[in-house]
Every structure is written in structure tokens, then in C-alpha cells.
Amino acid sequence: MKKGSTYQYVLAAFGAAIIAVLAQVTIPLPLIPITGQTLAVGIVVTILGTRLGTLSVLLYILLGAAGLPVFSGMSGGLGILVGPTGGYIVGFLATAIIMGLYLDKFGITFTQAIIANIIGMIITLSFGTVWLKIVADYTWTAAFLGGTAPFIVVGIVKAVMAAWIGVIVRRRLERAHLIEAIA
């Protein structure tokens, strides 16, 4: 069932809302906090695909840049985006595009969704690490050890969770004719 553009924008807004809500889920660990932002991006793109998933991420970033407290820790504003962790958030856009294109090409199966979400994790961590190196003036080693290494195992777990949740929700929405199936 083909839905109109207003319906699609509503889906993208729901996607942005899901990211904003899950961004507030934080597991405080001694050295680094683990947030639900990356999990949410993976779930949303797996469910909505390239175009609407990317639009959801863009809307989320724009809302946060405008100062709405949608980023982790109920924060918002341009200062977050240009700060040391802003690269992860900016990287969500590339993550959404590349994940979505991968899923468009190979289909949305559980296995392909895991692969896409792991690729997305690598992209997000890469953006975050490069940004951290530049903004915080770290060495590459320090940026990798502080911006990537602590998140690898958790990132893989989140990638599997995002794939599992995303595929299940997407299939149910397809069966209910609320989103279109990707051939």
C-alpha cells in the first residue's frame, strides 16, 4: 500500500522521536557511558529504510542543534555537535545512508540487518574517533583508545539488538500494511 508524503513524514518524525527517547537511556560505566542513541539509529534505519531512516536521523540532529534536549543526557545545542562527542552524532547521518543502502541492496533479513548494523557501528565509531582526534587534539592512538576501543563489544551487542528489534518491527508493520515491503 503506497502511503502519501504526509504519512511518510510522520513516520520519519516517529523515527526521530524513537532516537530522542532512546538517547536518554544511559548505562553509566566507570570510564564511559553507554547510551541508546546508536541502538536507536540502527533500529530506525532497519525499520524505515534509507530515505525515511536518514530523514529521521537528520530531523533528530536538527532538533538537537536547535537546542531541544534530544541528545544524550537531555542535552541539545550546537555546542554538543561541535564538542568532542559531536562526531558520533554527525556520523549518524552517514551511518543511516550506508546502512539503508546496504539493506536496500541485500534485503532486510536478520543476517543482513546484523551486517548492516555492524557496518553502521563502524561508521559511527570512525566519525566519532576522527572528530575526537581533531576537536580534543588527541593523538590517533589516544582517540582510538578513548573513542572506539571501549565501544566495540557493546557496539556489536547493540548491532545485534537493533537488527533483531528492527526486523521484527518492520515485518509486523509490513504485514499491517503500515510500511511498504522492500522487494
Image (spheres, helix red, strand yellow):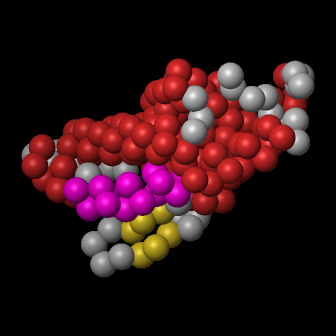
Front in this rendered view, residue 174 or 55 = 174
Residue 93 seen anywhere in this rendered image of the structure: no
Can you tell which quarter of the image residue 12 is in? Answer: top right
User: Quick check: 34 left or right of 48?
Assistant: left
User: Quick check: 45 left or right of 177?
Assistant: left
> Which residue is drawn at the image coordinates 18% and 49% (left, top)?
144
Q: Residue furthest bottom?
A: 30
Q: Position of residue 117 (x, y in %)?
A: 46, 43
Front in this rendered view, residue 177 or 82 = 177
Front in this rendered view, residue 34 or 120 = 120
Secondary structure of the magenta portion, mostly? helix
Q: How many marks?
A: 0
Position above or below: 177 against 150: above
> Which residue is drawn at the image coordinates 46% and 51% (left, top)?
159
> Which residue is drawn at the image coordinates 40% and 44% (left, top)?
118
From which residue to which does the magenta span run?
Answer: 149-162
Front in this rendered view, residue 167 or 45 = 167
Position above or below: 104 against 143: above
Can you tell which quarter of the image residue 57 is in? Answer: top right
Which part of the image, by quadrant, shows the C terminus? top right
* Residue 41 colored in magenta in the image: no
> Which residue is drawn at the image coordinates 68% and 50% (left, top)?
168
Q: Position of residue 11 (x, y in %)?
A: 78, 38
Which part of the image, by quadrant, shows the N terminus? top right
Residue 112 seen anywhere in this rendered image of the structure: yes
Can you tell which quarter of the image residue 7 is in? Answer: top right
